[in-house]
Image: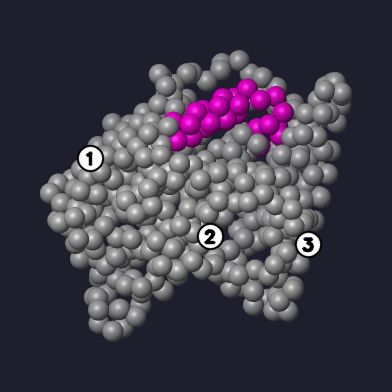
Amino acid sequence: MTAIPWRRLLLSAVVIVGAILLIRRERVDALGAGLLAAVLLIISVSMLLRAAVKTGGFANGYTLVLGAFLLTYPLSAFVHLTGKDYISLGFYEIAALDRHTQSHHVYLSLALVFLAQLALWWGLAPSRFRALPSRHHVVRIRTRLFVLAGAVFTLAGIVGTYLLFSRSGQLVEDVATIDRARQLSEGTARYVFMSTWLSWGIIFLLTVFLVSRFSANHPRISLATLVAGSACMFLNLFWTGSRAENLLAVMPLFFVVNKIASRYFRPFALVIALGIVAIIVFETIARTTTMLNGGLDLLVQGGTTPSQFVSNQLAAIFDWQMGRYPTISLAFDMVNRYGHAFGSTLLQGLTMTVNAPATLLHIPLKVPEPEAMTALVGQFIYQDPSINGVVPGTLAEFYFNFGTLGVLGGFFVIGRIAKYCISMTHSALNMGSLLLSFYVITLLCLWAIPMTATLGVYLLATRGFPVLLFCAVEQTLSRFVSFAPHSPERALPA
C-alpha cells in the first residue's frame, strides 16, 4: 500500500487557499466571513486526507462521499464569500441581499455546513476506520447472465433513445441540442429511462470483457475498449446537458475497473477524468454565459472587463455554476415565509418512486404527490408556478423540512447508508451485489448530497432498474444453482 504524503497535501491546500484569500479577498460586508470559509474548507480537506490515509487511497467510497460534500458546500462557501469584483453566479446570491437584515445568514450558513460535515463524517465512520479485510473472498461473475443482460439493456437503450427523439420529426437536431430544461411530450418518460439503460448494458458487457483471457492478453485493446464504452455513455446522455447525468452513468464503471481490473484503472481514470473535466467546463460555461448578470452580453455591452469575465467563468466552474452554499440562506427565508415543511418535500421523492411504474407504463393510476422542493423554490424566487426545476441542494431541503435537527439527522443517515454500501463492496460474493453497492454510492455522491435526498430513491428504482433486476435474478440463481469450479462462472479474489 502506497503511503500518502498527507502533510505535503495539507500544506499545499493551506497555501493555495491562503493565496486565493489574499488575492480575491473577502466578498461581502460580513467581518471574517471569507476567512471562516477558508478555515471550513481546510477542515474539510483534512477530513478527506484522513479518510484517504486510513483507507489507503482516494479511489474508494469513503473519500468519494466526503469529497462530494467538500465540492458541494465548503468549496461553494469559499467561492461565494471571496472575490469582490465578480458578478453574481447564483439565482439567490447572499452578496445581493440587504446586509443589515441578512448578513447573519452568512454565519448561520457556514455553521450549518460545518455541522452537516460532522454529521456525515460521524455517520460514515463513527469511531475510526476499520482496516480492510486481509483475507480474500471469492466474487462470482456469471458470464452468461452478464452477456444476456448486457445485450438486452444495450438494445433497450438504443431503442429508447431512438423512440425518444424520433417522435418530433427532428431526430438529428434534438439529439445534438443541449437543453436540460427540455420539454418532452407526454408518455415519453419510459423512453427517457430506457435510453439511460444503455449505460448499464455497456457496463455489463465490459465487465465480462475485463475478466476474459483476451483482455488479459491485450491490455491496450482493453483500455481502448473501456474508453470507447465510456464515450458511448457520454454521447448517449449528451442531449440532457447534465453533468451529474454523465457522472452517474460512468462512475459505477470506475468502481468495476478498480475492483476487478486494477491494472487498467490509472490510465482509464486519467483519460476519463480529462473527458469529464472538459464536459463540466463546456457545459458550465455554456450555461453561465446565458444567465442573467453572468453572460457574454455584459462583456459585449461593457458591463464587465475581460479579466472579470474569465474570473467569473472559473469561479462558476469550481462552484458548479451556481453553488449550494447561497441556497441555505434561501431555505432560511422560505421557513420564515412558509414555516417548516415537516418532510413533505422528502415524501414527494418517495411518492414519485411509488408512482414510477404507472409513469413508465403510462397508466393513470397514481397516488397524490406533495409539492416538490424544486417547485417551491421556483415559485418563491420567481413567483411563477410554471418554474419547477430549481434545485436548492439537500442541506437547504433538510433545513426547510426539519431545521437544524433535520440537517444533522439527514446527513448522518446519508453517512450510514454510504458506510453500509462500502462494507458491501468488501464482502459481497456476487458481482451484481457489488454493482448495486457501487451505484448507490454514486447516487449518494451525485444526488443525495448535492441535489435532493429522496430523488435518489426514484433514480434507483427507474434508472437503476437494470441492476436491480440483475441482482434479483442473480440471487435467485445463487439459491438454486450451486457454484462449481467448472460452471460457466468466473471467480475473482476481492
Residue at which label 2 appears: 242
Left or right of 358 on screen, residue 103 = left
Q: Which mark is residue 189?
A: none
Q: Amino acid at mark 3?
A: Val
Whether 49 is among the magenta residues is no
Q: Amino acid at mark 1?
A: Val
Which range of residues does the magenta coloring cover? 410-435
Say which of 369 and 292 sits in front.
369
Residue 137 location in percent, x, y? 66, 19
Residue at which label 3 appears: 159
State whether residue 15 is above or below residue 291.
above
Label 3 environment density (alpha carbons within 10 Å; few <14, some 14–19, many ≥20):
some
**Residue drawn at point x = 20 percent, y = 65 percent:** 85
SS of the residue at dot 2?
A: loop
Q: Which mark is residue 39?
A: 1
State whether residue 219 is above or below residue 165.
above
Q: Earlier in the sequence, mark 3 or mark 1?
A: 1
Q: Identify the residue at the far bottom of this view.
A: 301
Asked if labels 1 and 3 touch by Cβ distance under 8 angstroms, the answer is: no
Residue 7 location in percent, x, y? 28, 31
Q: Is residue 212 visible?
A: no
The kind of secondary structure the magenta stretch mainly shows is helix
Q: Amino acid at mark 2?
A: Ser
Say which of 285 and 456 sits in front.
456
**Residue drawn at point x = 29 percent, y = 71 percent:** 309
Q: Quadrant of residue 440?
A: top right
What quarter of the picture does the C terminus occupy? top right
Q: Is residue 467 visible?
A: yes
Whether 420 is among the magenta residues is yes
SS of the residue at dot 1?
A: helix
